[in-house]
């Protein structure tokens, strides 16, 4: 079960609410989600994954799974975020209908694991304990007195390097963290769990009965939508918001921990990417078009243009086209304060990128001014925009690359590179990519109002309605 519901605000501006860190390639050419799914792609060890996410990310996740050649067992859509306990309960209820004693491995979608072989070995060890009725958590053997993680104190030995859980500990201060490291009895809490479906549901009925009941109801009354299972909103929204740790693991008598060293990081901040990245002789990690002179111990990320640095050190510099972040490397945990200020000011930079992803592909704004806007549209092979019209704007489409099937009013035509068409105000239109290669379109909008909510949708293969949240 892969949890893909976070927003990753501490990795802003690259990670944003509508395109968060798990959907981004931060450590390799694969996205964090693709890396996570790839670690459990051996079908001799693992079943196809259950993915849990919110509605807004469903088509992006589906596209990334297709690109990785992976097919989920199911994709559960949460109507609202309720933390990890309701998500785990829903997945367990789903599994129980197929295999009551099925063993579930819960993985956050946004973790990095360098030593996959060690991860697999720990999972096989944990599976034995889970089959025996334990609620298993995987503890990361600490390498430093880290104050940013919760800890797990080992209890009595259970054999083969596993232990009962004596207690879970909140994030400690520096002095306490040093004592934990010295004692050798504590592991970092990675938020990775393993248990049988029937056992976790029994424990939830004992320790958080409202979550167990409501989550199971949301699955039972859920509706299939294309390749997704929409959890029934009323039931799921009635679940109290809580984590697996607080709701179950801190109270159960059957918790066990498997300590493991596997090069783990939750990539929880820009400093984590600096620590896990390939540093040059000056201690810098660079991504993109970067030139550094007399620069030391910096993380520099250029996503759309050149970033040049001179005579600086211990900085995080991230350029995304519409935002430039410059931060002290020791203050990156506070980036979320900027996100909070953006939200309070009613700005959009904490939610969306300049490139906005849709189920058919993406669009990005190239220029905007009074009564005009220019966009680049990329349409996936075989994908189609909805049949729609706009009340207040006209559009010109120019094919830059690929082949376009265009509907304007009652006329359907095929356009090739360097050909164009005009869509008047109040005219039904649709854009389809009938080819096998991505289709690139330059769209020029003109009119008195150019907002994304000026759309009337008549037919849509993705089941979207006419509202601003699903525009285009």
Image (cartoon, rainbow, N blue to C red):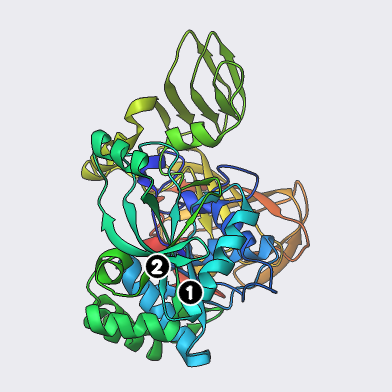
Which element carries disc 2, helix, strand or loop? strand
Q: Say which quarter of the image contains residue 73.
A: bottom right
Count residues near mark 2 (Cα–Cα under 10 Å), then give few for <14, some for 14-19, many for 20+.
many
Question: Mark 2 and mark 1: span between their CA atoms?
Answer: 8 Å
Q: Position of residue 460 (x, y in %)?
A: 53, 74
Give left or right: position of 303 versus 353: right
The residue lying toward the viewer, choosing from 256 and 33, is: 256
Q: Is 179 rendered above or below residue 386?
A: above
Q: As drawn, is 179 to the left or to the right of 297?
A: left
Mark before the other along the chain sequence, 2 or 1: 1
Question: Are there few (<14), some (14-19), or many (20+) residues within 10 Å of tag 1?
Answer: many
Where is residue 159? Give x, y as percent.
49, 67
Residue 396's place in the image compared with 358, above or below, is above
Pointers 2 and 1 in contact (C-beta within 8 Å): yes
Mark number for residue 129? 1
Q: Residue at x 58, y 22 (%)?
A: 306
Q: Quadrant of residue 120?
A: bottom right
Is there any visible trace of residue 349 in the rendered image?
Answer: no
User: The residue tagged with tag 1: helix, strand or loop?
Assistant: helix
Q: Is residue 114 left or right of residue 339?
A: right
How many discs mark residues in the rendered view?
A: 2
Establish if 97 lies above or below 426: below
Mark 2 sits on what residue? 256
Q: Position of residue 222 (x, y in %)?
A: 40, 86
Quarter where residue 13 is shown: top left
């Amino acid at each position: 079960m892969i949890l893909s519901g976070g927003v990753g605000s501490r990795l802003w501006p690259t990670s944003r609410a509508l395109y968060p860190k798990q959907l981004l390639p931060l450590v390799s050419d694969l996205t964090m989600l693709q890396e996570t799914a790839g670690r459990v792609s051996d079908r001799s060890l693992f079943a196809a994954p259950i993915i849990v996410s919110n509605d807004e990310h469903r088509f992006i996740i589906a596209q990334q799974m297709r690109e990785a050649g992976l097919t989920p067992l199911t994709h559960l859509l949460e109507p609202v975020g309720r933390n990890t306990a309701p998500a785990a309960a829903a997945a367990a209820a789903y599994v129980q209908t197929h295999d009551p004693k099925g063993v579930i491995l819960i993985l956050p979608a946004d973790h990095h694991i360098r030593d996959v072989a060690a991860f697999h070995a720990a999972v096989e060890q944990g599976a034995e304990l889970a089959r025996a009725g334990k609620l298993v958590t995987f503890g990361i053997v600490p390498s430093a007195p880290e104050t940013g993680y919760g800890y797990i104190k080992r209890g009595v030995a259970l054999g083969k390097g596993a232990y009962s859980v004596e207690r879970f500990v909140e994030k400690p201060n520096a002095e306490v963290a040093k004592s934990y490291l010295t004692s050798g009895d504590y592991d970092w809490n990675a938020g990775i769990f393993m248990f049988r479906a029937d056992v976790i549901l029994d424990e939830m009925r004992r320790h958080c009965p409202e979550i167990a009941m409501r989550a199971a109801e949301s699955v039972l009354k859920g509706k299939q939508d294309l390749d997704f299972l929409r959890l029934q909103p009323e039931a799921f929204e009635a679940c109290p918001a809580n984590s697996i740790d607080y709701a179950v693991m801190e109270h159960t008598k059957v918790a066990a921990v498997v300590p493991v060293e596997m090069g783990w990081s939750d990539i929880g901040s820009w400093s984590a990417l600096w620590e896990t990245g390939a540093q040059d002789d000056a201690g810098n990690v660079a991504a993109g078009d970067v030139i550094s002179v007399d620069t030391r111990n910096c993380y520099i990320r250029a996503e759309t243009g050149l970033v040049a640095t001179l005579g600086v050190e211990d900085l995080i510099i991230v350029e995304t086209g519409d935002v430039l972040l410059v931060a002290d490397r020791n203050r990156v945990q506070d980036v979320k304060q900027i996100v909070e200020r953006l939200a309070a000011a009613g700005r959009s930079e904490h939610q969306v990128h300049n490139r906005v992803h849709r189920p058919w592909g993406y669009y990005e704004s190239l220029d905007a001014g009074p009564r005009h806007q220019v966009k680049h549209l990329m349409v996936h092979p075989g994908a189609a925009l909805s049949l729609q019209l706009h009340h207040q704007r006209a559009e010109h489409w120019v094919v830059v690359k690929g082949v376009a099937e265009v509907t304007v009013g009652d006329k359907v035509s095929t356009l090739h590179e360097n050909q164009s068409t005009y869509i008047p105000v109040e005219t039904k239109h649709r854009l389809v990519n009938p080819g096998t290669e991505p289709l690139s379109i330059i769209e020029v909008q003109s009119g008195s109002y150019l907002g994304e909510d000026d759309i009337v949708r008549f037919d849509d293969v993705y089941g979207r309605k006419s509202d601003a949240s699903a525009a285009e």
